[in-house]
Image: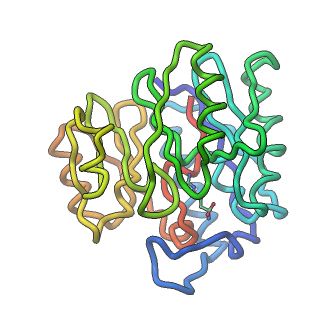
Amino acid sequence: MFKNAIVRKPCKALIDGISTAQFTEEGETPIYEKAVEQHAQYVKTLESLGAKVLVLDADERYPDSVFTEDPAVVMEGCAVITNPARESRNGEKEEILPAIKKYYSDDQIFFIKSPGTMEGGDVMLVDKHFYVGLSDRTNEEGARQFNEIVTKFGYTSSTVPVTEGLHLKDFAVYLSDNNLLVTEVMDKEPAFKDFNRYVIPAEELYAINSLYFNGTVIVPEGYPYTKKLIEDLGYPVLTVNNDEVKKIDGSLTCLSLRF
Ligand code: CIR
């Protein structure tokens, strides 16, 4: 069960967030007011599922700071402050630290150090095993340091290549009970061969990043195939409109740290 979540309010500078238009048309920029409303809905949804949510103030210095999943990875017993690869995001690691310190003591907090890079969007936990995506944002050295840290706390980790875009969890997401949502490419990934894999069609790519939270799955609004598939698997489903951060490559898991 997740008891806590850490989120950060969207800032006005959100319109300058990094975007490869992975999920939208080139040139679309988020509308700040709408992003604020959608974010508040996201927080309410987590609260309705039993989370106590720490809502951090917007930070105008970091356009992408709404994506609290990336500058840290949290688990039972330990937190890892990552080293975001893009310069415009790297300082987010300092800004998330005080929030992490509210829940973890100094001897439970570890740091990925240069030349290692990592972002939480590349880190997928399945029971006590972490799959770490090697991507533009997370490198071998970051994954090596991460492995060294988490093994001390009873976890294991292995790496998976990310070849289709930003982060691992844009292309493979674990729900529970061995169920994994995947792209066609990730369906063929040897590391995932023993999962019950559900291929999400390209037109619903964005909905792969659905969020399993305390027995319920939160699905982005507007993806009927994925919603039905998850319902048919027996999960209660809630939907959240995430259209504004989608324009800057942000998905549902990106918006929180959960533990
Ligand atoms: C970025 O490019 O870093 C942001 N615009 C999107 C980050 C999304 N985060 C995530 O998938 N965990």
The quarter of the displayed image where residue 201 is located: bottom left
Quadrant for ligand 1 reads: bottom right
Q: Is residue 173 left or right of residue 92?
A: left
Kindly give the residue lying farthest to the bottom in the view shown: 27
| Way the structure is coloured | rainbow
Q: Nearer the viewer, residue 123 or 58?
A: 123
- State how many labels appear: 0
Q: Nearer the viewer, residue 162 or 176?
A: 162
Q: Residue at x 51, y 27 (%)?
A: 2
Name the residue rendered at 79%, 27% in the picture. 101
Residue at image position (39%, 59%) is 220
The relative height of residue 193 versus residue 109 in the rendered view (above or below) is below
State the residue in front, 234 or 126. Answer: 126
Instruction: Determine which quarter of the picture holds residue 211.
Output: top left
Residue with the most extreme left position: 232
Location of the C terminus (image quadrant) = top right
Q: Position of residue 11 (x, y in %)?
A: 74, 64
Residue 199 is left or right of residue 64, and the answer is left
For residue 249, side relative to residue 241 (left or right): right
- Tell me: 162 left or right of 237: right
Residue found at x 68% / y 70%: 17
Image x and y of residue 206, in percent: 39, 63
- In the image, residue 238 sits, relative to residue 23, either above or below, namely above
Return the x and y of residue 183 as percentages of the image width and height. 29, 57
